[in-house]
Amino acid sequence: MIKLILTMLAGIIIGKIISHKKTTTLFSKIIFPIVLILLFFMGVAIGDNEVILNSFSSLGMQAFIITMGAVAGASVGGFLVYKLLLKYKKIR
Amino acid sequence: MRSSIIIFLTIAAGIFCGVYDLIPDFMGNNDPSMIILYILLFVVGLSLGNDTEIVEKIKTQSPYLIVIPFVTIIFSLLGVLVVSPLVTERSIPESLAVGSGFAYYSLSSVLITEYKGADLGVVALMSNIMREVFVLIAAPFLVKYFGKIAPICCGGATTMDSTLPIITKTCGNEFAIIAIINGVVVDFCVPFLVTYFCGI
């Protein structure tokens, strides 16, 4: 866990040192294919696992409840900050 | 839109290979995806550290607006915390790990698959796709009942790319920069929060 975060921090520091406009677009372009490789492996793990394949509706329900909680919370938070920013005239 | 199709086709191809055992024992002890994950996070770090324009953009904005991404993170997780007892199959940190995707479904689901297994990875994938789709559909409703910041908070990490068009359309162009800042900051926090909640 900590190793993963340190890896990312190392990336940030090195990225800062070699900061250049061209490299920024290069890096963001490489991210997508790497994510695709990992998503492919995730697909393999899903397809390989009969328990998952047979419990899609249950997993979907869990996902749905978590999503509803998250967007309800975010909406309340957004509402509060909107009222506050309006009150102190930080936005129109 | 094109990238979403590529993502779905890739996952479908993986599932196909898994179901028909086209890749023998790939997820065994010599799992290559952990190494790829390290490479990914390193490159994510590189691109974050490299991007100096973002810092400049944030500096030119009203300092009050920087609270919005933190409201997004804290209130989303509070919402998940409230409903997590309903998800009896999962522990509270597991639900929070799924919620920490903030609609960034590709990165959050691969991270969770590595740490918690593919079944929670699937939950993360579905949940975060639902969140993005919800914003795309419900943005006008959110603006009407919760004000113009709510779609940005609901959009989480996607408000700088996939949900940006609907946000500028429903909230107005002046909210584009807030959406971008929100997206960048939340995006940045996703790997940290997901790994944190997978660890406890």
Image (cartoon, grey):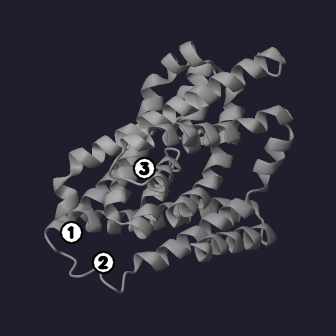
Q: Amino acid at mark 2?
A: Met
Mark 2 = which residue? Answer: B27
Give SS at disc 2: loop
Q: Which label number is shown at residue B10?
A: none
The chain containing the residue under callout 1 comes to A
**Outermost residue toward the top in this view:** B144
Residue B69 position within the rendered picture, expressed as x and y whole percent measured from the top left: 68, 40
Residue receiving disc 1: A48
Q: What residue is shown at x 61% (from left), y 72% (from top)?
A: B42
Work out how far the residue at label 1 is from the one at label 2, CA to CA, in angstroms. 9 Å
Local crowd at mark 2 within 10 Å, few (<14), some, or many (≥20)? some
Q: Secondary structure at mark 1?
A: helix
Residue at mark 1 shares a chain with residue at mark 3: no
In the picture, measured across the screen, residue B150 lies left or right of residue B87, that is right
Q: Nearer the viewer, residue B117 or A45?
A: B117
Mark 2 chain? B
User: Image quadrant for the N terminus of chain B?
Assistant: top left
Verify CB contact (< 8 Å) between mark 1 and mark 2: yes
Under mark 1, the amino acid is: Asp
Closer to us: B159 or B141: B141
Q: Which mark is residue B3?
A: 3
Asked if B139 appears above or below A25 in the picture, the reply is: above
